[in-house]
Amino acid sequence: MRGLMVSAMGSGQGKTVLTCGLLSAMRRRGIKTAGFKCGPDYIDPMFHTKILGVPSRNLDLFLQGEAGVRRSYAAAGAADLALVEGAMGFYDGVGGTDRASAYAVARFLRLPVVLSVRPKGSSLTLAAQVKGMQNFREENQIAALILTCCSPGLHAHLAPILEEETNLPVLGYLPPMEQADLPSRHLGLYTAGEVEHLRRRFAAVGEQLEKTVDLDRLLALAGGEAAKAQSFSRPRPACTIAVARDEAFCFYYPDNLEALERAGAKLTFFSPLRDQAPPVADGLYLGGGYPELYARMLGENAGMRENIRALVTSGLPTVAECGGFLYLQQTLEDEQGTAWPMTGALEGAGFRTQRLQRFGYGELTAQGDSMLFQAGEKTPFHEFHYWDSTRNGTDFRAVKPLGKQSWSFGMAGESLYAAFPHLHFGGALPLAQRFVQKAKEWREKHG
């Protein structure tokens, strides 16, 4: 498998549209392609997955470490091409450093980088900015440019200037397109399931790229660390874990779900919005998402709420992250500020705020033994939410990467992890194995 990264000088430069258009173009050409996203983002990989029909994986050096990133990258080694979408600006990493940035991932995997550049009222100055990107760090892997939201005339004007001044090839351009305008909300883009005719939209973008970008030259740049196909053995399931998955709960890392399967779990999926009860299972996984947007539907589904409350309070092994954590509490405000009843398995009320709460990466320390952690163990996490809770818990201690902010959070016990932070099961601690072991014990005890 050869690879390429699409990155940019910052957000709003067209990375996601360009990446998805290229994925669609590769699919159209019959090239078996794997999608990846740098960092902890859930939404962009949903777009990749919708287009390709196979899971797109995150490559996060902070959450996974080098071994975890290499393992996730190699998991798609059966593909012919890996297309990796960067996050934020190319050098933007943890705490104002380049740690865990797209640059760090590109350098680690030796991926050639194509910069998505959106001209905004500049010509020669644009070349100066690109040269600054080239000179800022050594071994930056920057190999080419593509102009986005750029007219044919502007491309004809800028391409020779950029090539002469930067010595980088300009492979082409993507003109302004109605299909490339994606709706967004407080947490970013709408999810793939909410964007109407998503595959058709990006098929149009891919067809346009075939006309205005030298895709053969782009493919010739592909390289990077060799990734051979790896097959992961999945043992005969020894337990079943019910996973909430619908519009309200849709933020899951594919690596997390696969880690549970490799540890011996069979996964069954259900909808807290529409089903009356979760399937019979030995464990429960409530991921993040947008429960605040569906608070009324969740609140009105009394059967599901009561069943979840009974299961969690009876000790069913449960992992509830961010949105799942809010769902386990007593009430949750919607966007209009109306509080709707939730499961009531935990104390606390979810309420809306006007800004991101405790946003970004951190490291947790377990204050005591629990289902997923032993006292004193540390693991990285990520938070991204505008809603907060009146009862965040005190079973973990969190610290920002630079150590300038710390706080207590989370509710944990022999059968529970419930907190805002999202965890990646591909890091150093055997979180998936511990979750599955508790589910096995539940199965043995309750038949």
Image (cartoon, rainbow, N blue to C red):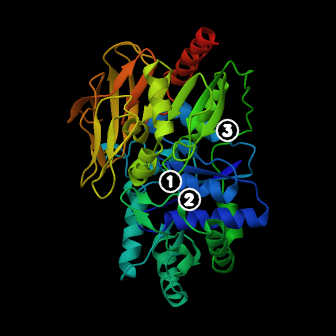
Question: What residue is shown with label 2?
Answer: 192
Q: Quadrant of residue 344?
A: top left
Q: Residues within 10 Å of mark 2 (few under 14, many from 20)?
A: some
- Residue 238 screen position, x and y as percent: 68, 18
Asked whether the residues under the numbered discs 2 and 3 touch, taking CB atoms below 8 Å apart as contact, a structural biologist would say no
Q: Tell me the kind of residue under disc 3.
A: Ala
Asked whether the residues under the numbered discs 2 and 1 touch, taking CB atoms below 8 Å apart as contact, a structural biologist would say yes
Query: Which element is circle 3 on?
Result: loop
Q: Which residue lies furthest to the right in this view?
A: 30
- Residue 136 screen position, x and y as percent: 37, 56
Residue at 49%, 54% (x, y): give it.
Answer: 86
Where is 227 relative to 444, above or below?
A: below
Q: Between residue 270 and residue 74, name the one nearer to us.
A: 270
- Residue 229 screen position, x and y as percent: 74, 38
Residue 425 appears in the rendering: no
Question: What residue is shown with label 3?
Answer: 75
User: How far is disc 2 from disc 1 in space, using C-alphas?
Assistant: 7 Å
Question: What residue is shown with label 1?
Answer: 43
Q: Between residue 348 and residue 81, name the one nearer to us.
A: 348
Mark 1 or 3 closer to N-term? 1
Residue at 55%, 65% (x, y): give it.
Answer: 195
Q: Tell me the kind of residue under disc 2.
A: Ala
Q: Tell me the kind of residue under disc 1.
A: Ile
Query: Which element is circle 1 on?
Result: helix
Rendered-image quadrant of the C terminus: top right
- Residue 105 screen position, x and y as percent: 50, 45
Mark 2 or 3 closer to N-term? 3
Q: Between residue 101 and residue 29, name the one nearer to us.
A: 29
User: How far is disc 1 from disc 3 in space, using C-alphas?
Assistant: 20 Å
Q: From the viewer's perspective, tell me whether residue 207 is left or right of residue 170.
A: right
